[in-house]
Image (spheres, coloured by chain):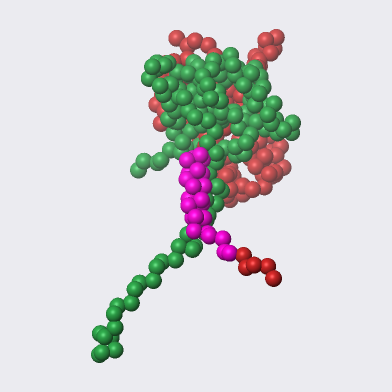
Chain colours: A green, B red
Amino acid sequence: MSKFTGKKQKEVPAISTGSMPDIIFMLIFFFMVSTTMRQNTLLVKISAPEATQIAKLERKSLVSFIYMGQPTQKQLGTETRIQLNDQFATPQDIPEYIAMERESRDEADRKLLTTSLKVDKDVKMGIVTDVKQELRKVGAFKINYSTRKKVEKE
Amino acid sequence: MAKKCPEINAGSMADISFLLLIFFLTATTMDVDTGIARRLPPPLDPTQEPPDIKKRNILDVFVNKNNRLMVGGRPCDISQLKEKTIEFIANPTNYEHYSEKREVEIPELGGTMQVSRGIISLKNDRGTAYDMYIQVQNELASAVDQLRDELCKEKFGVNFVDLKDEEKIKAIQKAVPVAISEAEPEEIK
């Protein structure tokens, strides 16, 4: 037994951290592939309504967003506001916004431009109708009502 | 002979890649945008007369500012909307208050099909909640979807969403058109 008891306990070898960068890089690639860049910071509170008949919004680069909802900042009141890009706007600003969005896309892609309406579920239809009328006037007919997938209740 | 190059210290590589990782975690979002796709009608030509459509071919859907629904002249619950829409469009018994059919030649589906002339006219008040509006749109879309699925199962044995052939998709769309007309905005008392 002296073979085992006589010697001092050997030190545990340090764990190799050499492959740590590889693991982290793997995670990075995962996130780069599966996520998209945040477009703009929301100035309005949006909780999308739920629906079952939904389709995925394809080709995010060809989508322009219009946000509608209550301002997140309390001092701005509770009235529904429209957000285009990073600022509040009125329905009258929409033609200009759509024109700018068209301008920034390729000539060939302009027809495929979709407008996604991200609207809070408590918003009244009046302002939504105004926005839709403006969109009709400038010929942005492809729209998408942003909704979440409804979870079926048993 | 050149001096042996000292090995580059790769110890901080992990830190650098962590930094990048954290950047991507904060600057990107994962949520997939989903929604109900619709096409807006082009602006109306004021000189053009509205098309003459028989009363029986129009299903009126009103939503008032209290989010109450009226379908075909009667108050209705949202849970019955889909059923009523399907009944109105499909009209299997040719009931005289539901939509008429016309014969359309669709060779992909094997000859003439009975295509409904029905149009759903959706009207809402300015005070209607957006949520309610989406629910109504959703029910109407799912009614059309169900009719397409039924026809698709009968003809090709698969659901409409699983159909890959462009021709077949077009044919089904022709046989069951989405005829939802949104009224010009006006105040509804």
Q: Quadrant of residue A105?
A: top right
Q: Residue B27 lies in magenta, yes or no?
A: yes
Q: Is residue A73 visible?
A: yes
Note whether A55 is above or below B19 in the view shown: above
Work out which quarter of the rendered image holds the C terminus of chain A and state it.
top left
Q: Is residue A121 visible?
A: no
Q: Nearer the viewer, residue B109 or A21?
A: A21
Count of numbered tags: 0
Across and down, in percent, residue A130 comes to: 55, 16
Across and down, in percent, residue A117 comes to: 53, 27
Residue numbers of the magenta segment: B6-32
Q: Residue at x 71, y 37 (%)?
A: B105
Q: Residue at x 42, y 30 (%)?
A: A47
Q: Residue at x 74, y 31 (%)?
A: A107
Across and down, in percent, residue B109 comes to: 67, 44
Note whether A86 is above or below B173 in the view shown: above
Q: Nearer the viewer, residue A25 or A66?
A: A25
Q: Residue at x 54, y 17 (%)?
A: A89
Q: Residue B139 lies in magenta, yes or no?
A: no
Work out which quarter of the rendered image holds the N terminus of chain A and state it.
bottom left
Q: Is A80 on the left or on the right of B161, as rendered?
A: left
